[in-house]
Amino acid sequence: MNMQLLSARDPGWTEWADVIVVGSGIAGLTAALRLKDQVERVAVVTKDVLQAGSTQWAQGGIAAALGEGDTPAQHEVDTLVAGAGACDLDAVRVLVGEGAEAVRELIEWGAEFDKDPSGDLSLTREGGHRRDRIAHADGDATGAEIQRALMEAVRRAPEILVFEHAMVVDLLTAADGGVAGLTIHVMGEGDADGVGIVRTRAVVLASGGLGQVFSQTTNPAVATADGMAIALRAGATLRDLEFVQFHPTVMYLGDDSRGQQPLISEAVRGEGAFLVDWDGARLMDGVHELRDLAPRDIVSKAIMKRMLESGRPNMWLDARHLGTPAGRAASDSERVETNTVFWERRFPNILASLRSYGVDPSTDLIPVAPACHYASGGVRTDLWGRSDVPGLYATGEVACSGVHGANRLASNSLLEGLVFSRRIAEVLPGELRQLEDPAPGPGTGRALVPGAALKQLQETMTTKVGVLRNAAGLAEAIEELERLGSVAATEIDPAAWEATNLLTVSLALAKAALLREETRGSHWRDDFAERDDPGFAGHFDLTLRDGEPVATFTPAPATDPLTPTLAGA
Ligand code: SIN
């Protein structure tokens, strides 16, 4: 019996595959499509239906140096600046260097991006980008279009086995510590006893992020940090977990609103919308040279600061002027009409969402507040997606390839999944392990946390490990999380597995955040308000010891990765 593994029922079935891809967003499906002709049997397992992950919710787009005059070097500088000195320069160079080709392949697979009147890709701008380089689809439905195209490509490839409603409980390792299989719970109709084992030679984790750690997030309900927790229990290292990105413009629906909240894409600011406070004053004036298009962490902090100073629960996004060219006089009715036409064409889905909450962006200000959006950290990988566990690869939001540093640049996330999944598919077939016996097998492992603990966990994380952090709050959060972990669940079920995964990752995140005594990127300590170089130029790496997350600090290379790039740009 392995006490690191979660308690689960005895497996009732077995299967095998050469490679199992866990997750079905852009990262997972790209890996499966690229691997299908290279190995005998590829399986994709996903906790819900194929399209339920984060990819389909991505609004803004996918960033790549595709426009005239743009270069990977310029994309690199913007990525490094946003990453606040914590990016891995080699990884960033891979991302920006291979990005354009990867997007072209996506187009060949059937993804249709918006075009301008001359037939070229229509590119827009988002926070932190100094150029228009974001390709988008159906205005504001980029992720949904990519998901559609990839799912259709997978359906045209019946050799890819797809298991929906299949939750991975644990990764099983062989005697040498490498991958041997997965325990999977298939959530069939009313079938409460669907645990089985799939033996495999390699696992590609592409299971997304950890948004459900917090009370409000832009992530869907399936984002329960499972991949990170599974990897940790299998002996992998998590890196940069404290760098959780809070998106500045998430629609504020009231303090009691929980779970996935409506995102108002940064591309709306890219088209000219701006933030104002309750007195109507422009919020980003004097804060950053890029004003409303400053990197995301800076905009989120400016909003939070003004919320705290004014005691208000939200700020406002003003997009009433969009569609009317600057300087052109228009009557109010003309402006409203032009604005509505603009919204219907450029942001039809966000418009529908706003209207469903009774907000008309041509006449109303949009209430916004920051909410959890993206985990910049995750399973530590090398430039080919390899984790520390032989046969375990990670890609997309679950991974920490080093491209995001302390704050991901807007629209680099879809690109990361695409680029690094292609790389994994290049090396994995040549590195396939033998099919090994899991040792030791699953059994009555670690006690589970009840699903009912989740609300308290999310409240603790939101109030004490959220946008604004300090030592006292973080220490209290760790104590509270440990207390939640001491109450064992009486049921073994998916809700308890998810809650246990969320607790493990929350504890790791809070511990790393407590140790990082500086403010950098999306990690904001009000008791250590400055960035501390060289003190914290490096990474907190987290592993499990006796079931508890333990952090160690790995210093960054002596040269700040920004210096040579900026000097040469
Ligand atoms: C957005 O559309 O604002 C989100 C894009 C991203 O997270 O990169």
Image: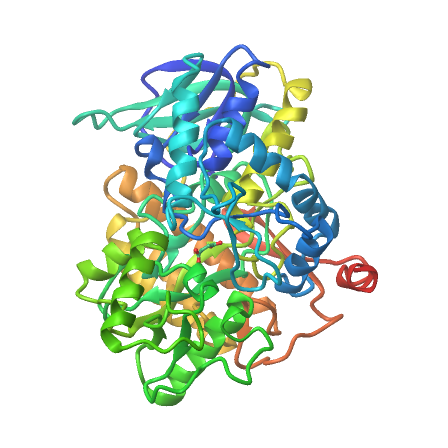
Left or right of residue 445, residue 404 in this image? right
Left or right of residue 561, residue 407 in this image? left
| Vertical order, 157 against 52 (above or below) | above
How far from the left and from the top, in percent, is residue 522? 54, 66
Given residues 163 and 353, the one toward you in this image is: 353
The image quadrant that residue 395 belongs to is top right
At x 41%, y 13%, the residue is: 158
Viewport quadrant of the C terminus = bottom right
- Where ligand 1 lies, by image quadrant? bottom left
Q: Number of labelled discs?
A: 0
Report if residue 440 is visible in the image: no
| Vertical order, 220 against 362 (above or below) | above
At x 41%, y 70%, the residue is: 273
Viewport quadrant of the N terminus = top left
The image quadrant that residue 351 belongs to is bottom left
Given residues 492 and 469, the one toward you in this image is: 469
How far from the left and from the top, in percent, is residue 198? 43, 19
At x 45%, y 38%, the residue is: 207
Residue that extends furthest to the top in the rendered view of this protein: 40
Colour convention of the picture: rainbow
Left or right of residue 67, residue 356 in this image? left
How far from the left and from the top, in percent, is residue 484? 34, 58
Given residues 183 and 333, the one toward you in this image is: 333
How far from the left and from the top, in percent, is residue 17? 48, 15
| Vertical order, 9 against 447 (above or below) | above
Report if residue 71 is visible in the image: yes
